[in-house]
Image (cartoon, rainbow, N blue to C red):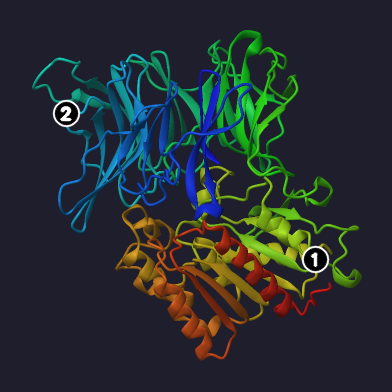
């Protein structure tokens, strides 16, 4: 579930349908009405901008502006009316992708990100789209490597947007700009949409990450990590942006996808926000007059979206997130009056939380769920890192036949992602079978400030692997797990970490790798534009660092790997092409090591189909049982 929006009293969002081939649909929930699927039957609503996409719709009244994955066009859908295509087919030889659309005041114009593929070139642009279709989409901003978050002001006179250039990723260095919009009104002929005057850079730079521009009347709010943590700022015309909260917590997360939305405003002007501290997401209310942050009691520990609904006594905070014991859903929290905790040190009094919607209900009895706890551990360089530890279900920490439990260490992807404490079926799959799980926030993970993220610069494949091995040994030394029965698991960037951790003398006997990076040089050469220079910072610039790329690539040094490997790969992965898995498998087999490779036809980077997900679970369980010598009855 993603893309939470509130229009009037209705909540809108997208959710994936694994049993329909991974199709993504748009849902609406109104008070007193059963949830409704608002996108057409059989249509997949998805953006492919930057390959990872993001929010692919915008609700307006009862209507829906959305992106059809089939033709990649913007469409307007309104109940009881024929769908209207808003963007023309791309010229011959080109492909146009759209994402992160917003309506400009007045309703005629939309603004969005467009990714234009022509030949071997990919250009990012911000365009204005005419809903009357009298004017072809007009480019408002171009010339930068990437754009995101075009946000028109409430009066439609100004446009805020984020831009950045290679070799930075948006969480490394990006800029927030504001420009005057010049959009023709209905009836004016020959007036092309554009920007008036020169845009102004409000914040950001090569060593500062900004995001989530959000208008509140004439003021523009955003987040910046200028002082190490992603914190909220406010800018008004003619003044310097002001930091509004100095809390050492993360009010943002890496912009892997478009449309992150965890800032919103109550009717009284207070900022409602998600922030991460001590290994979990929280909801806070920020008083713009004092900067006091008051936490609101609510059940979610991983939050993907946050919106405000209603006013006065009817005001609610709507949260899209998961609790520690139940998967993603939509919750409404009736917050009490601001000021209940002037020091901002404890949860604000709140009315009862109401679970408005959960697509699949609770898949596991709460009594069977392993709730994680954050554990700090020392790294080999003396810096503390953290992990989320899920003990196995059962009495104490007993594993099979009363022994200490085996351990699966999960190294998240990104590598600039982070461990999520919310309910995760792939974690509970192990804990319900007597296996402990540790999800490691190695150096470079998000959620711990910019300085911690920067610890992976030039160290990808080294620091992350060191930390995963250190975490496993720490848990064994503390008597929490069996030090002789450990497996490591990773997907995408985490696949590289897993393979780099499966070394002689290391704690792991096997690795499970899903669409994992195995050759860094091939990744830099073959991957898509968004990540094509990502390794410049994580490993080093090419060609100067070519020897480092070769040295850290598991496919180039299979002699360093000691243990069995399960490789799971999609046949249509544009980010880590299947050739990487193929070469890795051959390299391991040439050494006589066990390597089970399974390719899933039609799957890309991240598996979406129910049959694929089920088969992967079956393969992982069988593989881990075999390499650890656990009988099915255990």
Instruction: Name the residue at 52% across, 49% down.
Output: 453
- Tell me the crowding category of disc 1: few under 14, some 14 to 19, or many 20 or more residues within 10 angstroms, Cα based: many
Residue 19 appears in the rendering:
yes
Q: What residue does disc 1 label? A: 481
Quadrant that contains the C terminus: bottom right
Q: Is residue 111 shown above or below 269? A: below
Instruction: Name the residue at 80% across, 59% down.
Output: 392
Q: CA distance from mark 2 to mark 1?
A: 65 Å
Q: Is residue 393 shown above or below 124? A: below
Provide the secondary structure element on which disc 1 rests. loop
Q: Is residue 200 shown above or below 281? A: above
- Tell me the crowding category of disc 2: few under 14, some 14 to 19, or many 20 or more residues within 10 angstroms, Cα based: some
- Place of residue 88 in the rendered image (x, y in percent of width and height, measured from the top left): 21, 39
Task: Residue lying at the far front in this picture: please name it.
Answer: 80
Q: Which mark is residue 424?
A: none
* Residue 337 placement: quadrant: top right
Q: What residue does disc 2 label? A: 135
- Place of residue 103 in the rendered image (x, y in percent of width and height, measured from the top left): 34, 24
Q: How many marks?
A: 2
Instruction: Name the residue at 69% across, 70% down.
Output: 621
* Residue 201 placement: quadrant: top left
Instruction: Name the residue at 50% across, 62% down.
Output: 492
- Place of residue 90 in the rendered image (x, y in percent of width and height, measured from the top left): 20, 46
Provide the secondary structure element on which disc 2 rests. loop
Residue 203 appears in the rendering:
no
């Amino acid at each position: 579930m993603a893309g939470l929006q509130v229009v009037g009293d209705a909540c809108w969002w997208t959710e994936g349908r694994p049993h329909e081939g991974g199709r993504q649909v748009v849902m609406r929930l109104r008070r007193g009405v059963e949830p409704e699927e608002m996108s057409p039957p059989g249509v997949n609503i998805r953006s492919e901008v930057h390959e990872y996409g993001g929010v692919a719709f915008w609700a307006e009244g009862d209507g829906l502006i959305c992106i059809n994955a089939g033709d990649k066009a913007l469409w307007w859908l309104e109940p009881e009316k024929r769908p209207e295509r808003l963007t023309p087919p791309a010229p011959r030889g080109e492909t146009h992708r759209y994402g992160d659309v917003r309506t400009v005041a007045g309703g005629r114009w939309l603004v969005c990100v467009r990714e234009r593929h022509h030949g071997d070139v990919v250009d990012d642009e911000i365009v204005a789209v005419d809903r009357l279709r009298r004017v072809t989409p007009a480019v408002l901003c171009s010339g930068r490597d990437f754009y995101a978050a075009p946000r028109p002001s409430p009066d439609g006179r100004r446009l805020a947007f984020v831009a950045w250039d290679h070799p930075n990723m948006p969480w490394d260095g990006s800029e927030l700009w504001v420009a005057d919009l010049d959009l023709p009104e209905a009836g004016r002929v020959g007036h092309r949409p554009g920007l008036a005057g020169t845009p102004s850079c409000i914040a950001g730079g090569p060593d500062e990450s900004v995001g989530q521009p959000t208008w509140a009347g004439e003021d523009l709010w955003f987040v910046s990590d200028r002082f190490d943590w992603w914190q909220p700022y406010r800018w008004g015309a003619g003044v310097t942006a002001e930091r509004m909260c100095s809390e050492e917590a993360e009010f943002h997360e890496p912009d892997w996808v478009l449309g992150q939305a965890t800032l919103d405003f109550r009717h009284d002007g207070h900022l409602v926000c998600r922030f991460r501290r001590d290994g979990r997401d929280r909801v806070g209310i920020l008083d713009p007059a004092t900067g006091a942050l008051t936490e609101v009691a609510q059940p979610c520990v991983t939050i993907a979206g946050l919106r405000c609904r209603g006013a006065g006594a009817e005001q609610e905070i709507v949260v899209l997130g998961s609790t520690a014991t139940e998967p993603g859903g939509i919750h409404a929290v009736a917050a009490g009056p601001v000021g209940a905790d002037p020091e901002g040190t404890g949860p604000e009094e709140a009315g009862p939380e109401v679970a408005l919607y959960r697509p699949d209900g609770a898949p596991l009895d709460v009594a069977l769920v392993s709730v994680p706890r954050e554990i700090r551990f020392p790294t080999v360089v003396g810096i503390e890192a953290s992990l989320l530890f899920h003990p196995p279900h059962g009495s104490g920490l007993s594993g099979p036949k009363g022994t200490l439990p085996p351990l699966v260490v999960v190294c998240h992807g990104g590598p600039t992602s982070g461990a999520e404490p919310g309910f995760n079926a792939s974690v509970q799959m192990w804990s319900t079978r007597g296996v402990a799980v540790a999800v490691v926030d190695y150096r470079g993970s998000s959620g711990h400030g910019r300085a911690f993220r920067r610890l992976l610069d030039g160290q990808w494949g080294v620091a992350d692997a060191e930390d995963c091995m250190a975490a496993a040994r720490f848990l064994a030394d503390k008597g929490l797990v069996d030090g002789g029965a450990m497996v490591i698991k990773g997907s995408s960037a985490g696949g590289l970490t897993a393979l780099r951790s499966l070394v002689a003398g290391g704690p792991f006997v096997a690795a499970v790798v899903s669409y994992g990076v195995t050759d860094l040089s091939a990744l830099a050469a073959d991957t898509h534009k968004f990540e094509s220079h990502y390794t410049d910072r994580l490993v080093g610039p090419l060609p100067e660092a070519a020897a480092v790329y070769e040295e850290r690539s598991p496919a180039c040094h299979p002699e360093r790997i000691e243990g069995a490997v399960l490789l799971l790969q999609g046949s249509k992965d544009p980010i880590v092409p299947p050739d990487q898995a193929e070469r890795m498998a051959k390299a391991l087999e040439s050494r006589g090591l066990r390597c089970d490779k399974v390719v899933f036809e039609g799957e890309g980077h991240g598996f979406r189909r129910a049959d694929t997900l089920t088969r992967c679970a079956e393969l992982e369980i069988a593989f881990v049982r075999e390499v650890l010598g656990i009988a099915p009855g255990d």
